[in-house]
Image (cartoon, grey):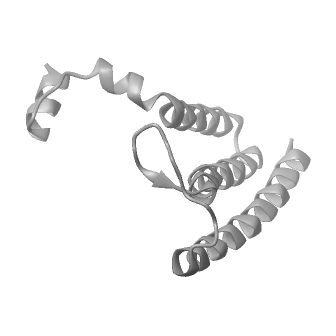
């Protein structure tokens, strides 16, 4: 298990380096606009780098956390896997979870409605 943890940490480090390069390219693109922009479903203009950064950050953090938890107690590894699964679920199915919550204008009223 510890060998797999070291392997995941190495993969996480490589992914982190690629993510930093992606961030650099995105910052340069914000200045010179050489990557084509397209419109997504919600009407927001975006580039492919925006998706790479959004999902890449989650990937890097998930891989490094999973690799670190494999070096520790197995219960911690199970907790980390569950948290990663919840984050990925919210990333892809966030609109579904919003439909389950009660609709209110005030944030404190929403919290009270969830508790009640």
What is the tally of numbered marks visible in this picture? 0
Q: Is residue 93 above or below residue 59?
A: above
Residue 115: image location, x then y, percent: 18, 24
Between 88 and 45, the one nearer to me in the picture: 45
Quadrant of the drawing holding the C terminus: top left
Between 54 and 59, the one nearer to me in the picture: 54
Residue 17: image location, x then y, percent: 75, 69
Judge from the rendering whether residue 12 lies leftward or rightward of residue 58; answer left or right: right
Picture quadrant where residue 23 is located? bottom right
Between 61 and 98, the one nearer to me in the picture: 98
Picture quadrant where residue 29 is located? bottom right
Judge from the rendering whether residue 65 lies leftward or rightward of residue 8; answer left or right: left
Residue 31: image location, x then y, percent: 53, 81
Judge from the rendering whether residue 18 lies leftward or rightward of residue 87; answer left or right: right
Quadrant of the drawing holding the N terminus: top right
Q: Is residue 34 above or below residue 88?
A: below
Residue 45: image location, x then y, percent: 46, 54
């Amino acid at each position: 298990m510890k060998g797999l943890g070291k392997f995941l940490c190495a993969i996480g480090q490589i992914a982190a380096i690629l993510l930093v390069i992606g961030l650099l390219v995105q910052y340069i693109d914000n200045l010179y606009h050489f990557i084509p922009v397209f419109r997504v479903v919600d009407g927001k203009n975006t580039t492919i780098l925006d998706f790479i950064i959004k999902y890449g950050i989650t990937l890097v953090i998930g891989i490094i956390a999973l690799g670190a938890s494999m070096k520790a107690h197995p219960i911690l590894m199970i907790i980390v896997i569950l948290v990663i699964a919840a984050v990925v679920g919210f990333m892809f199915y966030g609109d579904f979870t919003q439909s389950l919550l009660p609709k209110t204008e005030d944030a404190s009223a929403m919290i009270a409605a969830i508790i009640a």
